[in-house]
Image: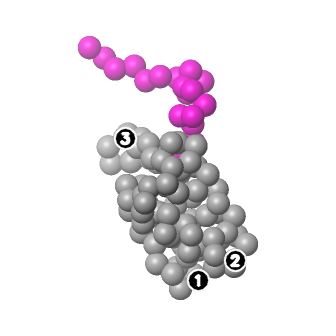
Amino acid sequence: MQATPIPPHLLPESAHGAYGWVPDLGLTVSGPAAMDDLWQLEALMTDQGMKLQATRMVYDRSYALDRLACAYARGDETLRDLAQRIFDSFQRRGEWIGLAH
């Protein structure tokens, strides 16, 4: 039996966007936020002297909420806007990180 991929135009809108590419497996990984956004957040936070593990943000909701709150409160407009966008992505995907703990 041969697996046939679902054409992107047939996927629900909620399935677009927050996928990261796993080149060694040739597969996509679905997460609560786009990995590109998480890596950008990691770089911006590092530039501001803060720490962030982008991959941990995917599976540790308490950690994600803490890091997003720190990024939002830092005062840098770019960092704040990105943190808000990532938080909104978590919420849209049903993660409800604000209610986790």
Measured in 3D between alpha carbons, the distance from the residue under mark 2 to the one under mark 1, in whole angstroms, is 9 Å
Three-letter amino acid code at disc 1?
Gln
Residue receiving disc 1: 48
Q: Position of residue 13 (x, y in %)?
A: 60, 31
Task: Residue 74: name its quadrant.
Answer: bottom right
Cα distance between the residues tagged 3 and 1: 34 Å
Relative to residue 54, is residue 80 drawn left or right? right
Q: Earlier in the sequence, mark 3 or mark 1?
A: 3
Specify the segment rendered in magenta.
1-18
Choose between 85 and 16: the one closer to the eye.
85
Secondary structure category for the residue under label 1:
loop
Q: Are marks 2 and 1 in contact (CB under 8 Å)?
A: yes
Q: Label 3, on which residue?
A: 26
Q: Mark 2: which secondary structure?
A: loop
Q: Which element is circle 3 on?
A: loop
Please say whether residue 17 is one of the residues in the magenta stretch.
yes
Indicate the amino acid at tag 2: Asp
At 73% from the left and 72% from the top, the residue drawn is 77
- Residue found at the far top of this picture: 1
Q: Is residue 40 left or right of residue 76?
A: left
Residue at the location (63% across, 70% down)? Answer: 72
Label annotation for residue 76 = 2
